[in-house]
């Protein structure tokens, strides 16, 4: 009689609802180009933190998988990635500039009040010059668009390798 426990099987992976990139290849190509230009001028680790945070808010498993792996590859720590879900209570893990970017990410991602509060924008503007702030807002907008493709088509996580789409 064996004392080893049998491994518990994982739930089966759900297939995507739709392979949208195959059916709208020009949109996909445009998104890739938009993503590339929106990322310009942003420090890679900050950019990945912003993308992970927006993806957490939007519940996009595919983007969480991708950007967590890219953040790790860019030198980000596991601890800081884990704490993103509770960044407001884990402020001491981040710089003031990163906190301003995360707060702006939350405000731009969740527009239920219909606007980004002035105090959130002003805090970000203290840490980013106008060109950087423009790029940051663009990066936030683009990851939100990617998240919407991911959650609406239920693109499964777990298959991405760091740098795969660069």
Image: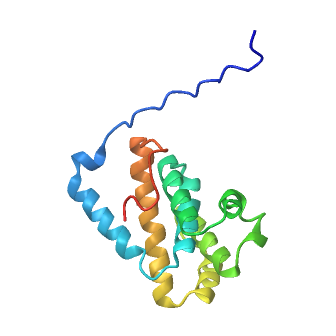
Q: Percent from the top left, x then y, of residue 160?
A: 44, 51
- The quarter of the picture where residue 6 lies is top right
Write the residue at 23% across / 51% down: 24
Taking the image as shown, residue 140 lies to the left or right of residue 102, namely left
* Rendered view: 110 above or below 102: above
Quarter of the image with the N terminus is top right
| Image mark count | 0
Write the residue at 56% across / 72% down: 45
Q: Residue lying farthest top? A: 1
Taking the image as shown, residue 20 lies to the left or right of residue 108, namely left
Q: Residue lying farthest front? A: 1
Write the residue at 65% across / 24% down: 7
Quarter of the image with the C terminus is bottom left
Between residues 11 and 138, which one lies in front from this camera angle? 11
Q: Percent from the top left, x then y, of residue 120?
A: 63, 77
Between residues 13 and 69, which one lies in front from this camera angle? 69
Taking the image as shown, residue 53 lies to the left or right of residue 147, namely right
The reply to whether residue 91 is in sight is yes
Q: Percent from the top left, x then y, of residue 96?
A: 70, 80
The reply to whether residue 113 is in sight is no
Q: Percent from the top left, x then y, of residue 14?
A: 45, 32
Write the residue at 55% across / 49% down: 59
Q: How is the image coloured?
A: rainbow
């Amino acid at each position: 009689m064996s004392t080893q426990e049998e491994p518990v099987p994982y739930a089966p992976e759900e297939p995507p609802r739709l392979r949208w990139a195959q059916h709208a290849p020009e949109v996909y190509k445009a998104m890739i180009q938009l993503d590339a230009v929106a990322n310009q001028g942003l420090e890679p680790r900050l950019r990945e933190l912003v993308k992970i945070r927006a993806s957490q808010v939007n519940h996009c498993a595919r983007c969480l998988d991708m950007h967590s792996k890219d953040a790790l590859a860019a030198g980000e720590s596991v601890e800081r990635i884990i704490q993103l879900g509770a960044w407001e209570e884990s402020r001491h893990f981040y710089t003031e500039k990163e906190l301003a970017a995360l707060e702006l990410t939350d405000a731009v991602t969740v527009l239920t009040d219909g606007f980004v509060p002035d105090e959130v924008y002003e805090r970000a503007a203290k840490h980013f010059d106008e060109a950087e702030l423009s790029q940051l807002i663009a990066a936030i907008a683009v990851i939100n668009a990617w998240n919407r493709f991911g959650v609406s088509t239920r693109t499964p996580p777990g298959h991405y390798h760091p740098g795969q789409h660069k």
